[in-house]
Amino acid sequence: MCDVEAFTSNSSNDVLNAIKTQGASCVNALFSAESRIQEAAFDSGHMYNIAKHTTNLAKAYAGGGSDELEALFLYLRAGYYAEFYNNKVSFLSWVTPAVKEAVDAFVNNANFYENSDPHGKVLSEVIITMDSAGLQHAYLPQVTQWLTRWDSQYAQNWYMRNAVNGVFTILFGGQWNEQFVQTIGNQTELVKALGDFALRSSAIGASDEFMAANAGRELGRLTKYSGSASSTVKSKLTEIFAQYEMYGRGDAIWLGAADTVSYYADCSDYGICNFESQLKGLVLSQSYTCSPTIRILSQNMTQDQHVEACSKMGYEEGYFHTSLETGRQPVEDDYNTQLQVNIFDSSDDYGKYAGPIFNINTNNGGMYLEGDPATPGNIPNFVAYEAPYANPDHFVWNLEHEYVHYLDGRFDLYGGFGHPTERIVWWSEGIAEYVSKENDNQAAIDTIKDGSTFTLSEIFETSYDGFDVDRIYRWGYLAVRFMFERHKDDVNQMLIETRQGNWANYKATINQWAILYQSEFEQWQQALVSGDAPNAVITANSEGKVGESITFSSENSTDANGKIVSVLWDFGDGTTSTQTQPSHQYGSEGQYTISLTVTDNDGLTASTTHSLTITAQGGSDALPQDCAVQSKISGGRLTAGQAACLATQQTIWLSIPAVNEHTSMAITTANGVGDLKIEYSNDGWPNGSNHHAWSDNAGNAECITLSNQRNYWGYVKISGEFENAAIVVDFDTSGCRQ
């Protein structure tokens, strides 16, 4: 265990002893320590005295690594980190010269260019300290030497790669150092070394290729400086663009250079203008349309993977609209109509290509780019990647989470990403986690167990500053789940405000929640951790008729450590019931959200919802007889209850959404001339071996009936020679149409 309080002593000797005894891992905790600890730990006197002690150790360094030196240099650079981010930490003028003396002692040591991983751990801290202390200008000769000396022997060691990669941080950070700016434009030898480093063919596909890419990026940045080295900068960059490909061999280096050159210089001088759009066409070369609202651009996905991704988003879409009772009505001034899902082949490809194509940071698990929804023609983008290390059922990393961001932005939140004037991170990330994971989020439950708890008031004030993963995602999820399970009506009232952009009212609402529900939130957490909360389950059809008696059941609800003692139904039309298996009739057409709340013998509750569509009374219409003069479909999605005429072609592929939300389904074809065959699968497109049902009578009159489908999407293949035939799918019916 680390004792950060030990670093707050008034005695520099005590602080030094804490560094030595606790080591680098505990010194590292000072980066995120609270303000008072940083103020005490990084007193100017402490920094000076510890720098002096470090100087003596650095002079005596015998190579082979030193845990003590590693921890000491880490302490010094942590001090500069605190000074930059904590306005209560400020160093007197004599601190940095003492730190430079310590760095100089290590640089001048005969073992500075040693090659070993233990040495690399110390070297890394020294090189980063050069940058943190604002001393980039003082060590350009050493930067040049490392670039020149680097070879495959150095590259074999991970810590050496990590350490020497820090020289590119020096070159990057130097742009804010006036002494660096005044001299870098004349550093011809450094430029040559930097260019040669990027042009090393041996780096392609090797463990240090990322360093060559960083060299290309920093070489491109040097175009912003004028001086005698400018012609060499241009010459080396021209070689890079000629030797490597934008997409292919050496593309990480090509793109690294192009990224900075296009920002700081005239792209036409290098023939790379508009490379971003060209790159997008090369990388995301596959196009697959899930539906009128979702299009996938992918790098390397199979047909089955495209279908599966569409299926997952289709399920999330239905679950989202049911849970949030949106009525599928977008917020005002939202003209987004189609989401573009961009899927790279791997996290490495995402890191390499997504930055230049979409102008985003890629040190994350994917990103949703909403654009301006108030602009007609705006296309929101979700940028993601395939993750072979993930669960096979979730091969596109964060697919469901990011898709919920799109739905939330379109149906719950007025305006674009920057429109809210109050903090909504807890809701945005929490609802994405809750809808995508539902009640399966062990990481959130574990964060309750480890004691890193937050109050509702703190959760509602969450921002992305500092990027606290637990607070943003886990506790956002927990707060949203709590409100859905215990106070769904309050959530609905809040959404009235967010959908209209009434942020002051939204803020007043959640402030009231923080006061009213904190104690209940704590009780709910403990029930969640102990696993004692019941599980509410609704069993019912998803469609019905006006005046028809519809049966609902709560009998599949469970309680692992007790029993359910009461239930409360809300049928969505102002009526309720406390029966376990009630029947209800609706007096008018419409879509209704039914809610069920169950309470166990410990007083713990759980809630769930179910969507029900009520239509007018009347039997099923016969299929159209006039397809010869009607518009026809050649593919796409079937809508339950709506007959469609089939185009005349050898094979037609059709999908049916939400088949697993119904107890039964019937697919009917009829009329026209010829002889068609119909095949159905619930596990991807019918391929001859994955049938769940088929019908192949003489003529076009075919019938398939099914029940209890497992997956969200159903897939239909129509084949044969036929004309003017019609098709319809019906849910929760006794059989095919006559």
Image (cartoon, rainbow, N blue to C red):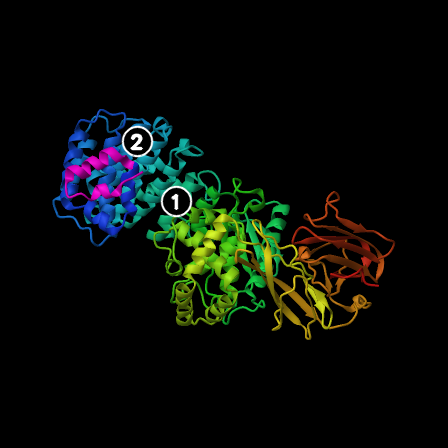
In the structure shown, which secondary structural element does the residue marked by tag 2 occupy? Answer: helix
* Highlighted range, magenta: 1-24
Left or right of residue 413: residue 267:
left
User: Which residue occupies the foreground of this view, 124 or 233?
Assistant: 124
Task: Give amino acid for label 1.
Answer: Gly
Crowding at mark 1 (Cα within 10 Å: few <14, some 14-19, many 20+) = many
Please provide percent x and percent y for residue 323: 56, 62
Circle 2 crowding by C-alpha within 10 Å: few under 14, some 14–19, many from 20: many
Q: Which residue is mark 2?
A: 120
Could you tell whether 656 is left or right of 667 in the image? left
Residue 380: x and y in percent read 50, 60
| Identity of the residue drawn at 34% across and 40% down | 215
Name the residue at 77% across, 50% down: 693
**Extreme residue toward the bottom, this view:** 587
The secondary element bearing badge 1 is classed as helix
Residue 16 lies, in percent from the top left, at 19, 36
Residue 571: image x %, image y %?
63, 68
Pick whichever, 182 or 297, lies toward us. 297
Closest to the observer: 307 or 422? 422
**Up-down: is 695 above or below 689?**
below
Residue 325: in magenta span: no
Separation of marks 2 and 1 at Cα, in angstroms? 25 Å
In the figure, 46 relative to 591: above or below?
above
Q: Of the residues under marks 2 and 1, which one precedes in the sequence?
A: 2
Q: Tell me the amino acid under the disc marked 2.
A: Gly
Q: Nearer the viewer, mark 2 or mark 1?
A: 2
Residue 256 image label: 1
Determine the main secondary structure of the stretch shown in magenta. helix
Q: Nearer the viewer, residue 6 or 368?
A: 6
Q: Is residue 477 visible?
A: no
Image quadrant holding the N terminus, namely: top left
